[in-house]
Image: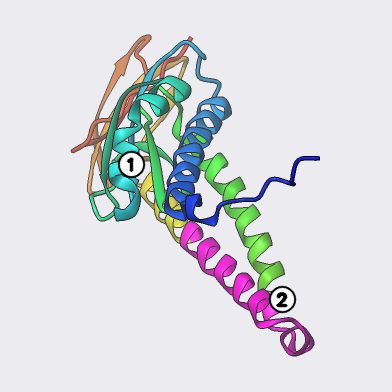
Amino acid sequence: ISAWPKGDDAKIDDEAEKLMNAIMDSIKAIRNMRAEVNVNPGKKVPATILAAPEFKAGIEANANYINLMGGISELTVLDATAAKPENAMATVVSGVEVYLPLAGLIDVEKENARLGKELATIEKELARINGKLGNAGFLAKAPQAVVDKEKAKADELNTKKAAILERLEYLKTFIVALVLFQKSIFINCINGNCYSIIKYHQMRFSIRKHFRIIFITSK
Protein backbone atom coordinates (compact mmCIF):
# COMPACT_ATOMS: atom_id res chain seq x y z
CA ILE A 1 0.00 0.00 0.00
CA SER A 2 1.38 3.37 -1.01
CA ALA A 3 1.91 5.99 1.65
CA TRP A 4 -0.55 8.85 1.85
CA PRO A 5 0.82 11.82 -0.16
CA LYS A 6 2.40 14.57 1.90
CA GLY A 7 2.39 18.23 1.06
CA ASP A 8 5.61 20.14 0.64
CA ASP A 9 5.31 23.42 2.50
CA ALA A 10 8.43 24.70 0.74
CA LYS A 11 6.48 24.80 -2.53
CA ILE A 12 3.67 26.95 -1.13
CA ASP A 13 3.99 30.49 -2.47
CA ASP A 14 1.66 32.83 -0.60
CA GLU A 15 2.66 35.84 -2.72
CA ALA A 16 1.91 33.98 -5.96
CA GLU A 17 -1.51 33.00 -4.60
CA LYS A 18 -2.29 36.63 -3.68
CA LEU A 19 -1.26 37.77 -7.17
CA MET A 20 -3.39 35.10 -8.84
CA ASN A 21 -6.36 36.11 -6.69
CA ALA A 22 -5.85 39.75 -7.73
CA ILE A 23 -5.78 38.74 -11.42
CA MET A 24 -8.89 36.57 -11.08
CA ASP A 25 -10.70 39.30 -9.13
CA SER A 26 -9.79 41.82 -11.86
CA ILE A 27 -11.21 39.56 -14.58
CA LYS A 28 -14.33 38.93 -12.51
CA ALA A 29 -14.77 42.68 -11.93
CA ILE A 30 -14.49 43.41 -15.67
CA ARG A 31 -16.98 40.67 -16.55
CA ASN A 32 -19.43 41.81 -13.89
CA MET A 33 -19.30 45.44 -15.02
CA ARG A 34 -19.80 44.43 -18.65
CA ALA A 35 -22.72 42.18 -17.72
CA GLU A 36 -24.42 44.81 -15.56
CA VAL A 37 -24.68 47.21 -18.50
CA ASN A 38 -25.29 44.51 -21.13
CA VAL A 39 -22.15 45.05 -23.17
CA ASN A 40 -22.12 42.78 -26.23
CA PRO A 41 -19.86 39.78 -25.39
CA GLY A 42 -18.02 40.25 -28.67
CA LYS A 43 -17.28 43.92 -28.06
CA LYS A 44 -13.78 44.66 -26.80
CA VAL A 45 -13.23 47.73 -24.64
CA PRO A 46 -10.16 49.35 -23.09
CA ALA A 47 -9.55 49.07 -19.36
CA THR A 48 -7.29 50.61 -16.74
CA ILE A 49 -6.10 48.93 -13.56
CA LEU A 50 -4.61 50.77 -10.60
CA ALA A 51 -2.59 48.14 -8.77
CA ALA A 52 -0.86 47.96 -5.42
CA PRO A 53 2.97 47.78 -5.70
CA GLU A 54 3.09 44.06 -4.95
CA PHE A 55 0.67 43.29 -7.82
CA LYS A 56 1.62 45.74 -10.59
CA ALA A 57 4.47 43.79 -12.25
CA GLY A 58 2.57 40.50 -12.03
CA ILE A 59 -0.58 41.97 -13.58
CA GLU A 60 1.46 43.51 -16.40
CA ALA A 61 3.14 40.15 -17.07
CA ASN A 62 -0.25 38.43 -17.25
CA ALA A 63 -2.14 41.15 -19.12
CA ASN A 64 -2.85 38.77 -22.02
CA TYR A 65 -5.00 36.59 -19.77
CA ILE A 66 -7.01 39.59 -18.56
CA ASN A 67 -7.44 40.85 -22.13
CA LEU A 68 -8.57 37.44 -23.38
CA MET A 69 -10.92 36.55 -20.53
CA GLY A 70 -12.25 40.07 -19.94
CA GLY A 71 -12.81 41.11 -23.55
CA ILE A 72 -10.28 43.95 -23.29
CA SER A 73 -8.83 45.67 -26.35
CA GLU A 74 -6.08 47.51 -24.47
CA LEU A 75 -5.09 47.21 -20.81
CA THR A 76 -3.27 50.01 -18.99
CA VAL A 77 -1.72 49.12 -15.62
CA LEU A 78 -0.80 52.02 -13.34
CA ASP A 79 0.44 52.48 -9.78
CA ALA A 80 -2.24 52.61 -7.11
CA THR A 81 -1.28 56.25 -6.47
CA ALA A 82 -1.85 57.31 -10.09
CA ALA A 83 -4.72 59.65 -11.00
CA LYS A 84 -8.00 57.79 -11.23
CA PRO A 85 -9.41 57.64 -14.79
CA GLU A 86 -12.18 60.14 -15.43
CA ASN A 87 -15.54 59.21 -16.93
CA ALA A 88 -15.08 55.54 -16.08
CA MET A 89 -17.02 52.71 -14.51
CA ALA A 90 -15.15 51.40 -11.46
CA THR A 91 -14.90 48.35 -9.22
CA VAL A 92 -12.62 48.08 -6.20
CA VAL A 93 -11.17 44.71 -5.14
CA SER A 94 -8.36 43.91 -2.71
CA GLY A 95 -5.25 45.75 -3.86
CA VAL A 96 -6.70 46.58 -7.27
CA GLU A 97 -9.04 49.19 -8.79
CA VAL A 98 -10.51 48.35 -12.22
CA TYR A 99 -11.87 51.03 -14.57
CA LEU A 100 -13.83 50.75 -17.81
CA PRO A 101 -14.57 53.90 -19.87
CA LEU A 102 -18.09 55.29 -19.71
CA ALA A 103 -18.07 56.63 -23.27
CA GLY A 104 -19.91 54.20 -25.52
CA LEU A 105 -20.36 51.76 -22.64
CA ILE A 106 -23.09 52.95 -20.26
CA ASP A 107 -25.21 55.89 -19.26
CA VAL A 108 -24.56 57.84 -16.08
CA GLU A 109 -27.92 57.07 -14.46
CA LYS A 110 -27.30 53.33 -14.69
CA GLU A 111 -23.80 53.71 -13.22
CA ASN A 112 -25.24 55.75 -10.35
CA ALA A 113 -27.78 53.00 -9.68
CA ARG A 114 -25.10 50.29 -9.82
CA LEU A 115 -22.83 52.13 -7.38
CA GLY A 116 -25.78 52.90 -5.12
CA LYS A 117 -26.69 49.21 -4.94
CA GLU A 118 -23.08 48.23 -4.20
CA LEU A 119 -22.89 50.91 -1.51
CA ALA A 120 -26.07 49.63 0.15
CA THR A 121 -24.64 46.09 0.26
CA ILE A 122 -21.38 47.34 1.80
CA GLU A 123 -23.19 49.44 4.39
CA LYS A 124 -25.37 46.48 5.38
CA GLU A 125 -22.31 44.27 5.85
CA LEU A 126 -20.50 47.03 7.75
CA ALA A 127 -23.46 47.39 10.10
CA ARG A 128 -23.36 43.66 10.79
CA ILE A 129 -19.62 43.65 11.49
CA ASN A 130 -19.72 46.83 13.58
CA GLY A 131 -22.55 45.30 15.57
CA LYS A 132 -20.29 42.38 16.43
CA LEU A 133 -17.32 44.58 17.25
CA GLY A 134 -19.52 46.78 19.44
CA ASN A 135 -20.83 43.79 21.38
CA ALA A 136 -18.93 43.37 24.64
CA GLY A 137 -19.98 39.73 24.86
CA PHE A 138 -18.53 38.94 21.43
CA LEU A 139 -15.25 40.70 22.24
CA ALA A 140 -14.97 38.85 25.54
CA LYS A 141 -15.71 35.36 24.20
CA ALA A 142 -14.35 35.35 20.64
CA PRO A 143 -10.72 34.36 20.01
CA GLN A 144 -8.50 37.34 19.21
CA ALA A 145 -7.86 35.95 15.72
CA VAL A 146 -11.62 36.09 14.99
CA VAL A 147 -11.88 39.65 16.29
CA ASP A 148 -8.89 40.72 14.19
CA LYS A 149 -10.43 39.11 11.12
CA GLU A 150 -13.67 41.06 11.59
CA LYS A 151 -11.71 44.29 12.06
CA ALA A 152 -9.79 43.60 8.84
CA LYS A 153 -13.08 43.03 7.00
CA ALA A 154 -14.42 46.33 8.33
CA ASP A 155 -11.27 48.17 7.18
CA GLU A 156 -11.53 46.68 3.69
CA LEU A 157 -15.23 47.52 3.42
CA ASN A 158 -14.61 51.09 4.59
CA THR A 159 -11.95 51.46 1.89
CA LYS A 160 -14.37 50.23 -0.76
CA LYS A 161 -17.11 52.48 0.61
CA ALA A 162 -14.87 55.55 0.40
CA ALA A 163 -13.96 54.75 -3.21
CA ILE A 164 -17.63 54.31 -4.18
CA LEU A 165 -18.66 57.57 -2.50
CA GLU A 166 -15.88 59.33 -4.36
CA ARG A 167 -17.14 58.00 -7.70
CA LEU A 168 -20.75 58.92 -6.90
CA GLU A 169 -19.68 62.45 -6.05
CA TYR A 170 -17.72 62.70 -9.28
CA LEU A 171 -20.64 61.48 -11.38
CA LYS A 172 -22.74 64.33 -10.01
CA THR A 173 -20.48 66.82 -11.78
CA PHE A 174 -21.88 66.02 -15.19
CA ILE A 175 -25.62 65.91 -14.64
CA VAL A 176 -26.30 67.94 -17.77
CA ALA A 177 -28.99 66.35 -19.92
CA LEU A 178 -32.42 67.36 -21.15
CA VAL A 179 -34.67 65.90 -23.81
CA LEU A 180 -37.44 68.18 -25.11
CA PHE A 181 -40.01 67.45 -27.78
CA GLN A 182 -38.14 64.25 -28.75
CA LYS A 183 -35.07 66.24 -29.78
CA SER A 184 -31.56 65.95 -28.36
CA ILE A 185 -30.28 68.94 -26.45
CA PHE A 186 -26.65 69.99 -26.17
CA ILE A 187 -25.67 71.81 -22.99
CA ASN A 188 -22.16 73.06 -22.25
CA CYS A 189 -21.48 73.48 -18.54
CA ILE A 190 -18.37 74.88 -16.88
CA ASN A 191 -18.19 75.17 -13.11
CA GLY A 192 -21.90 74.52 -12.83
CA ASN A 193 -22.93 77.29 -15.24
CA CYS A 194 -24.84 76.02 -18.27
CA TYR A 195 -25.23 77.86 -21.54
CA SER A 196 -25.36 77.51 -25.36
CA ILE A 197 -28.36 75.23 -25.75
CA ILE A 198 -28.30 73.78 -29.29
CA LYS A 199 -30.66 71.18 -30.71
CA TYR A 200 -29.25 68.08 -32.40
CA HIS A 201 -30.78 64.88 -33.76
CA GLN A 202 -29.63 61.27 -33.34
CA MET A 203 -26.40 62.03 -31.54
CA ARG A 204 -24.75 59.34 -29.51
CA PHE A 205 -23.90 59.65 -25.85
CA SER A 206 -20.45 61.10 -25.17
CA ILE A 207 -18.63 62.92 -22.40
CA ARG A 208 -15.64 65.20 -22.91
CA LYS A 209 -12.95 65.69 -20.35
CA HIS A 210 -12.60 69.44 -19.93
CA PHE A 211 -16.20 70.46 -20.48
CA ARG A 212 -19.03 68.63 -18.82
CA ILE A 213 -20.89 67.80 -22.02
CA ILE A 214 -23.49 65.10 -22.52
CA PHE A 215 -25.26 64.08 -25.74
CA ILE A 216 -28.35 61.87 -25.48
CA THR A 217 -29.84 60.11 -28.45
CA SER A 218 -33.58 60.54 -28.89
CA LYS A 219 -35.75 58.45 -31.19
Q: Closer to us: mark 1 or mark 2?
A: 1
Q: Is residue 52 visible?
A: no
Disc 2 residue type (three-letter): Gly
Main SS of the magenta part reads helix
The x and y percentages for residue 199 are 31, 17
Disc marking residue 58: 1
In the image, farthest residue toward the left = 210
The x and y percentages for residue 147 are 65, 78
Disc 1 residue type (three-letter): Gly
Which contiguous range is marked in magenta?
132-161
The x and y percentages for residue 55 are 35, 48
Mark pair 1, 2: CA separation: 38 Å
Q: Does residue 141 sit above or below 39 in this rendering?
A: below
Do the residues bearing badges 1 and 2 touch, measured as CB atoms within 8 Å? no
Using a 10 Å C-alpha cutoff, classify the residue at mark 2 as few (fewer than 14 neighbours), some (14 to 19) or many (20 or more): few
- Residue at screen point 41% across, 26% down: 65
Q: Secondary structure at mark 2?
A: helix
Q: Give the total of numbered labels.
A: 2
Residue annotated with mark 2? 131
Quadrant hosting residue 68:
top left
User: Relative to the observer, which residue lies in front, 154 or 192?
Assistant: 154
Q: In the image, is residue 156 part of the stretch drawn in magenta?
A: yes
